[in-house]
Amino acid sequence: MKNIYIATENAFLRSGLVELAQESDITLQPAKIDEPGFIDALEKDDAVIVHIDRNTPAEYFDYTMRINEKCRLMLVLNNPNLMYICDASVITTSRSSLKELMRAVGVLMSNKKLENQMRVCLTAKEKIILRETMNGQKVDQIAKVLNMSPKTVYTHRANVFSKLGGSSVNAIYSLKNRIMKEMTV
């Protein structure tokens, strides 16, 4: 790893991780991911740890997607339900102990996946169908764009609902809205 950044407003989490990292000869640099030019300056060998809680601005989701495209990303989430809609190299919860979080940092640096992540694994098609459904696209529109039958889209969408613990579009919207509400309250 070239540089490892930590972005959090939680002073306890930041100082605890920075101190534990120093014991392991790892330097965590505090960062603000919304700072102009920060994401553009990231390189493939860098890593960013982002803590997301209910005080985190919603635009951080866009920032984390951009970061994940450029380098390794570790998300520390207050809400375990966010694991269903987030994508990163390593995802863990803020309810983990500092030692467990440092283990996750070690995994981040090793370019491996964290074992026992409580993540739902969606296929590439399922992710596209979920995203388009959340953007208000109808099944027929999604089927046309993906060059598949509407019945196949319904099947993929039903699989997504099952994996996410819902049974309908409204249940998934409800999950998304609840998560976003918790982020802004």
Image (spheres, helix red, strand yellow):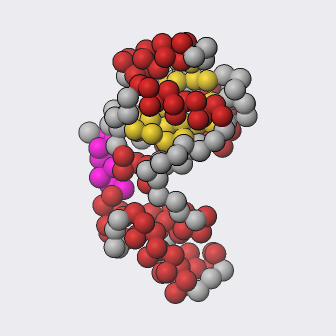
Q: Is residue 153 left or right of residue 136?
A: right
Q: Nearer the viewer, residue 72 or 112?
A: 112
View extreme (left): residue: 185
The residue drawn where x is 43% and y is 76% is 158
Answer whether residue 29 is visible to the viewer in this image: no
Residue 92 on image: x %, y %: 45, 39
| Residue 24 forms part of the magenta stretch | no
Residue 86 on image: x %, y %: 49, 49
Quadrant in which the N terminus appears: top right
Residue 120 on image: x %, y %: 47, 58
Q: Is residue 174 left or right of residue 43?
A: left
Count of number-bearing discs: 0
Answer whether residue 61 is visible to the viewer in this image: yes
Q: Is residue 109 above or below residue 128?
A: above
Q: Quadrant of residue 95?
A: top left
The residues colored magenta run 176-184
Q: Nearer the viewer, residue 146 or 18?
A: 18
Q: Quadrant of residue 98?
A: top left
The residue drawn where x is 44% and y is 63% is 134
> Would you say the magenta stretch is mainly helix, strand or loop?
helix
Q: Is residue 51 left or right of residue 54?
A: right
Q: Quadrant of residue 41?
A: top right
Q: Is residue 3 above or below residue 142?
A: above
The residue drawn where x is 44% and y is 35% is 76
| Residue 178 forms part of the magenta stretch | yes
The residue drawn where x is 73% and y is 34% is 44
Q: Is residue 172 above or below residue 68?
A: below
Quadrant in which the C terminus appears: top left
Q: Nearer the viewer, residue 47 or 140?
A: 47
